[in-house]
Amino acid sequence: MNVAYHLKKLGINPTLITRVGLDNYGKKLIQLMEKNDISTDFFQMDFELNTGKVSVTAGDGDDIIYDIIKPVAWDNMQWDDNFIALLSTSTYFVFGSLIARNGVSRNILFKLLEIAKNKVFDINLRPPHYSREILERLLMDLSLLKLNLVELDLLTGWFSDYKNETDRIKILQDRFHIPNIVLTKGSHGSVLNFHGTFYEHPGFTVELADAVGSGDAFLAGLILKLSQKAAPLEALEYSNALGALIASYDGPCPKYDIEEIQNLIETKSVH
Protein backbone atom coordinates (compact mmCIF):
# COMPACT_ATOMS: atom_id res chain seq x y z
CA MET A 1 0.00 0.00 0.00
CA ASN A 2 2.82 2.42 0.87
CA VAL A 3 4.51 1.79 -2.49
CA ALA A 4 1.20 2.42 -4.27
CA TYR A 5 0.71 5.67 -2.37
CA HIS A 6 4.09 7.05 -3.40
CA LEU A 7 3.78 5.85 -7.00
CA LYS A 8 0.54 7.80 -7.25
CA LYS A 9 2.27 10.89 -5.86
CA LEU A 10 4.91 10.46 -8.55
CA GLY A 11 2.34 10.40 -11.36
CA ILE A 12 1.95 6.64 -11.87
CA ASN A 13 -1.48 4.98 -11.62
CA PRO A 14 -1.05 1.87 -9.43
CA THR A 15 -3.65 -0.76 -8.61
CA LEU A 16 -3.48 -2.51 -5.26
CA ILE A 17 -4.54 -6.16 -4.96
CA THR A 18 -5.52 -6.96 -1.39
CA ARG A 19 -8.27 -8.20 0.92
CA VAL A 20 -9.76 -6.39 3.91
CA GLY A 21 -12.28 -7.20 6.61
CA LEU A 22 -15.67 -5.66 7.33
CA ASP A 23 -14.28 -3.50 10.13
CA ASN A 24 -13.34 0.12 10.66
CA TYR A 25 -9.74 -0.49 9.62
CA GLY A 26 -10.89 -1.86 6.28
CA LYS A 27 -13.24 1.06 5.76
CA LYS A 28 -10.53 3.57 6.65
CA LEU A 29 -8.09 1.92 4.27
CA ILE A 30 -10.56 2.09 1.40
CA GLN A 31 -11.33 5.72 2.23
CA LEU A 32 -7.61 6.55 2.31
CA MET A 33 -7.10 5.01 -1.12
CA GLU A 34 -10.13 6.77 -2.60
CA LYS A 35 -9.02 10.07 -1.08
CA ASN A 36 -5.70 9.71 -2.88
CA ASP A 37 -7.34 8.55 -6.11
CA ILE A 38 -5.82 5.05 -5.92
CA SER A 39 -7.92 2.27 -7.45
CA THR A 40 -9.75 -0.04 -5.02
CA ASP A 41 -11.23 -2.15 -7.83
CA PHE A 42 -9.22 -5.15 -6.64
CA PHE A 43 -9.92 -4.82 -2.92
CA GLN A 44 -11.60 -8.04 -1.81
CA MET A 45 -13.91 -8.14 1.21
CA ASP A 46 -13.63 -10.91 3.81
CA PHE A 47 -16.72 -11.63 5.90
CA GLU A 48 -14.88 -13.56 8.63
CA LEU A 49 -11.31 -12.29 9.02
CA ASN A 50 -10.31 -8.80 10.13
CA THR A 51 -8.24 -6.28 8.20
CA GLY A 52 -4.49 -6.82 8.63
CA LYS A 53 -2.78 -4.95 11.45
CA VAL A 54 0.85 -4.52 12.45
CA SER A 55 2.26 -3.36 15.77
CA VAL A 56 5.41 -1.31 15.20
CA THR A 57 8.00 -0.38 17.83
CA ALA A 58 11.39 1.27 17.49
CA GLY A 59 14.49 -0.78 18.23
CA ASP A 60 18.16 0.18 18.33
CA GLY A 61 19.38 2.65 15.70
CA ASP A 62 17.50 2.19 12.43
CA ASP A 63 15.92 -1.08 13.61
CA ILE A 64 12.14 -1.40 13.71
CA ILE A 65 10.32 -4.30 15.39
CA TYR A 66 7.12 -5.58 13.77
CA ASP A 67 4.38 -7.77 15.22
CA ILE A 68 2.31 -8.82 12.21
CA ILE A 69 -1.08 -10.11 13.38
CA LYS A 70 -2.45 -13.35 11.91
CA PRO A 71 -4.69 -14.65 10.53
CA VAL A 72 -6.11 -11.63 8.74
CA ALA A 73 -8.07 -10.94 5.58
CA TRP A 74 -5.07 -10.74 3.25
CA ASP A 75 -4.10 -14.27 4.31
CA ASN A 76 -7.27 -15.39 2.51
CA MET A 77 -6.90 -13.94 -1.00
CA GLN A 78 -9.17 -15.49 -3.63
CA TRP A 79 -8.60 -15.83 -7.36
CA ASP A 80 -10.26 -13.34 -9.69
CA ASP A 81 -10.14 -13.92 -13.46
CA ASN A 82 -9.87 -10.16 -13.88
CA PHE A 83 -6.33 -10.46 -12.53
CA ILE A 84 -5.26 -11.72 -15.96
CA ALA A 85 -6.33 -8.58 -17.81
CA LEU A 86 -4.92 -6.37 -15.06
CA LEU A 87 -1.45 -7.90 -15.17
CA SER A 88 -1.39 -8.00 -18.96
CA THR A 89 -1.55 -4.19 -18.98
CA SER A 90 0.76 -3.61 -16.00
CA THR A 91 4.43 -2.74 -16.48
CA TYR A 92 5.51 -3.89 -13.00
CA PHE A 93 4.14 -6.37 -10.48
CA VAL A 94 5.37 -5.51 -6.98
CA PHE A 95 5.04 -8.11 -4.22
CA GLY A 96 6.47 -9.02 -0.84
CA SER A 97 7.14 -12.25 1.02
CA LEU A 98 4.55 -11.78 3.78
CA ILE A 99 1.64 -12.63 1.48
CA ALA A 100 3.19 -16.09 1.08
CA ARG A 101 3.00 -16.97 4.80
CA ASN A 102 -0.42 -18.61 4.31
CA GLY A 103 -1.03 -21.34 1.74
CA VAL A 104 -4.27 -19.81 0.43
CA SER A 105 -2.79 -16.43 -0.50
CA ARG A 106 0.53 -18.03 -1.45
CA ASN A 107 -1.15 -20.06 -4.19
CA ILE A 108 -2.77 -16.90 -5.55
CA LEU A 109 0.63 -15.20 -5.58
CA PHE A 110 2.20 -18.08 -7.49
CA LYS A 111 -0.54 -17.84 -10.13
CA LEU A 112 -0.03 -14.09 -10.43
CA LEU A 113 3.72 -14.55 -10.83
CA GLU A 114 3.11 -16.88 -13.75
CA ILE A 115 1.43 -14.12 -15.77
CA ALA A 116 3.18 -10.97 -14.47
CA LYS A 117 5.68 -9.18 -16.69
CA ASN A 118 8.38 -7.41 -14.70
CA LYS A 119 8.39 -8.85 -11.17
CA VAL A 120 9.66 -6.63 -8.35
CA PHE A 121 10.27 -8.48 -5.08
CA ASP A 122 10.47 -6.34 -1.94
CA ILE A 123 11.42 -9.25 0.24
CA ASN A 124 10.44 -7.93 3.73
CA LEU A 125 11.60 -10.84 5.90
CA ARG A 126 9.74 -10.74 9.21
CA PRO A 127 10.25 -13.78 11.47
CA PRO A 128 8.55 -16.22 11.66
CA HIS A 129 6.64 -15.51 8.43
CA TYR A 130 8.95 -17.12 5.87
CA SER A 131 10.77 -20.32 4.92
CA ARG A 132 13.82 -21.00 2.79
CA GLU A 133 11.90 -23.23 0.37
CA ILE A 134 9.27 -20.62 -0.45
CA LEU A 135 11.75 -17.76 -0.62
CA GLU A 136 13.95 -19.59 -3.11
CA ARG A 137 10.92 -20.13 -5.32
CA LEU A 138 9.94 -16.46 -5.10
CA LEU A 139 13.47 -15.36 -6.03
CA MET A 140 13.25 -16.98 -9.46
CA ASP A 141 12.47 -15.02 -12.64
CA LEU A 142 12.60 -11.54 -11.12
CA SER A 143 13.28 -8.19 -12.76
CA LEU A 144 14.29 -6.49 -9.51
CA LEU A 145 15.01 -7.63 -5.95
CA LYS A 146 15.02 -5.14 -3.08
CA LEU A 147 16.44 -6.17 0.30
CA ASN A 148 18.31 -4.77 3.31
CA LEU A 149 21.58 -5.83 4.94
CA VAL A 150 19.97 -8.25 7.40
CA GLU A 151 18.01 -9.93 4.60
CA LEU A 152 21.10 -10.13 2.38
CA ASP A 153 23.11 -11.80 5.14
CA LEU A 154 20.32 -14.25 5.91
CA LEU A 155 19.69 -15.31 2.31
CA THR A 156 23.31 -15.68 1.28
CA GLY A 157 24.19 -17.33 4.58
CA TRP A 158 22.17 -20.34 3.44
CA PHE A 159 24.61 -21.21 0.68
CA SER A 160 27.80 -19.13 1.07
CA ASP A 161 30.10 -17.68 3.71
CA TYR A 162 31.09 -14.52 1.84
CA LYS A 163 31.30 -11.44 4.07
CA ASN A 164 31.66 -8.76 1.39
CA GLU A 165 28.37 -7.07 0.39
CA THR A 166 29.15 -7.02 -3.31
CA ASP A 167 30.14 -10.70 -3.31
CA ARG A 168 26.89 -11.59 -1.56
CA ILE A 169 24.88 -9.63 -4.11
CA LYS A 170 26.73 -11.36 -6.96
CA ILE A 171 25.98 -14.75 -5.42
CA LEU A 172 22.26 -13.96 -5.37
CA GLN A 173 22.38 -12.57 -8.88
CA ASP A 174 24.14 -15.62 -10.28
CA ARG A 175 22.23 -18.25 -8.33
CA PHE A 176 18.75 -16.90 -9.13
CA HIS A 177 19.48 -15.07 -12.41
CA ILE A 178 18.28 -11.70 -11.09
CA PRO A 179 19.32 -8.85 -13.44
CA ASN A 180 18.84 -6.04 -10.91
CA ILE A 181 19.36 -6.10 -7.14
CA VAL A 182 19.15 -3.08 -4.84
CA LEU A 183 20.46 -3.18 -1.29
CA THR A 184 19.20 -0.54 1.15
CA LYS A 185 21.39 0.37 4.12
CA GLY A 186 19.23 2.75 6.13
CA SER A 187 20.96 6.05 6.79
CA HIS A 188 24.04 4.77 4.92
CA GLY A 189 22.45 4.86 1.48
CA SER A 190 22.12 2.00 -0.97
CA VAL A 191 23.85 -0.17 -3.56
CA LEU A 192 22.38 -1.12 -6.94
CA ASN A 193 23.64 -3.92 -9.13
CA PHE A 194 22.18 -3.07 -12.53
CA HIS A 195 22.76 -5.84 -15.09
CA GLY A 196 26.08 -6.77 -13.51
CA THR A 197 27.43 -3.28 -12.81
CA PHE A 198 27.52 -1.83 -9.29
CA TYR A 199 26.37 1.69 -8.42
CA GLU A 200 26.39 3.20 -4.94
CA HIS A 201 24.86 6.23 -3.23
CA PRO A 202 25.82 7.13 0.37
CA GLY A 203 22.43 8.62 1.25
CA PHE A 204 21.15 12.03 2.31
CA THR A 205 21.29 13.63 5.72
CA VAL A 206 17.86 14.54 7.13
CA GLU A 207 16.40 15.05 10.57
CA LEU A 208 14.78 11.68 11.28
CA ALA A 209 11.13 11.74 12.33
CA ASP A 210 9.90 8.24 11.44
CA ALA A 211 11.76 5.57 9.47
CA VAL A 212 8.63 3.44 8.87
CA GLY A 213 7.77 3.45 5.18
CA SER A 214 10.97 5.08 3.93
CA GLY A 215 12.00 1.85 2.21
CA ASP A 216 8.66 1.70 0.40
CA ALA A 217 9.13 5.30 -0.76
CA PHE A 218 12.65 4.39 -1.92
CA LEU A 219 11.23 1.53 -4.01
CA ALA A 220 8.55 3.74 -5.55
CA GLY A 221 11.19 6.25 -6.60
CA LEU A 222 13.36 3.52 -8.09
CA ILE A 223 10.46 2.02 -10.04
CA LEU A 224 9.59 5.45 -11.42
CA LYS A 225 13.12 6.14 -12.62
CA LEU A 226 13.64 2.66 -14.05
CA SER A 227 10.36 2.96 -15.94
CA GLN A 228 11.68 6.24 -17.38
CA LYS A 229 14.90 4.50 -18.48
CA ALA A 230 16.93 6.84 -16.27
CA ALA A 231 20.63 6.18 -15.78
CA PRO A 232 21.25 3.86 -12.79
CA LEU A 233 23.05 6.50 -10.71
CA GLU A 234 20.28 9.01 -11.34
CA ALA A 235 17.68 6.42 -10.36
CA LEU A 236 19.59 5.58 -7.19
CA GLU A 237 20.03 9.22 -6.22
CA TYR A 238 16.33 9.95 -6.69
CA SER A 239 15.14 6.92 -4.75
CA ASN A 240 17.53 7.69 -1.88
CA ALA A 241 16.25 11.25 -1.78
CA LEU A 242 12.61 10.16 -1.66
CA GLY A 243 13.32 7.60 1.05
CA ALA A 244 15.17 10.19 3.13
CA LEU A 245 12.42 12.76 2.59
CA ILE A 246 9.75 10.40 3.91
CA ALA A 247 11.92 9.53 6.92
CA SER A 248 11.84 13.24 7.80
CA TYR A 249 8.03 13.08 8.07
CA ASP A 250 5.79 11.26 10.55
CA GLY A 251 4.05 8.20 9.12
CA PRO A 252 4.69 6.17 5.96
CA CYS A 253 2.24 8.09 3.75
CA PRO A 254 2.61 11.80 4.61
CA LYS A 255 1.51 14.74 2.51
CA TYR A 256 4.41 16.16 0.52
CA ASP A 257 5.16 17.86 -2.79
CA ILE A 258 7.28 15.96 -5.27
CA GLU A 259 9.32 19.13 -5.80
CA GLU A 260 10.74 18.47 -2.33
CA ILE A 261 12.59 15.44 -3.71
CA GLN A 262 14.57 17.49 -6.20
CA ASN A 263 15.11 20.21 -3.62
CA LEU A 264 16.68 17.64 -1.30
CA ILE A 265 18.97 16.43 -4.08
CA GLU A 266 20.09 19.96 -4.86
CA THR A 267 20.45 21.40 -1.36
CA LYS A 268 21.20 18.61 1.13
CA SER A 269 24.77 17.50 1.58
CA VAL A 270 25.61 13.89 0.82
CA HIS A 271 27.42 12.21 3.70
Image (tube, grey):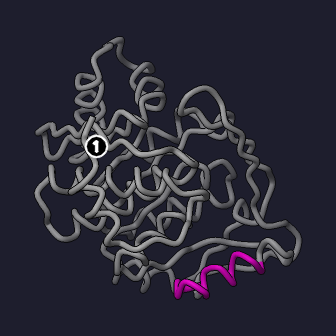
Q: Assess whether residue 167 is covered by the magenta stretch.
A: no
Note whether 99 is above or below 255 in the view shown: above
Residue 41 location (% of width, % of height): 58, 88
Viewer-nearest residue: 14 or 240: 240
Residue sitting at x 53%, y 57%: 249
Q: What residue type is labelled 1?
A: Ile
Q: In which quadrant of the rendered image does the N terminus lie?
A: bottom right
Note whether 226 is above or below 8 in the view shown: above
User: Badge 1 is on which residue?
Assistant: 181
Q: Residue furthest front?
A: 267
Residue sitting at x 53%, y 33%: 62
Give the quadrant of residue 84: bottom left
Span highlighted in magenta in the image: 27-40
Viewer-nearest residue: 140 or 96: 96
Residue sitting at x 35%, y 33%: 188
Residue sitting at x 35%, y 66%: 260
Is 271 placed left or right of 33 in the picture?
left
Q: Residues within 10 Å of mark 1 (few under 14, many from 20)?
A: many
Residue 67 location (% of width, % of height): 75, 42
Is 27 placed left or right of 207 in the picture?
right
Q: Assess whether residue 39 is covered by the magenta stretch.
A: yes
Secondary structure mainly formed by the magenta segment: helix
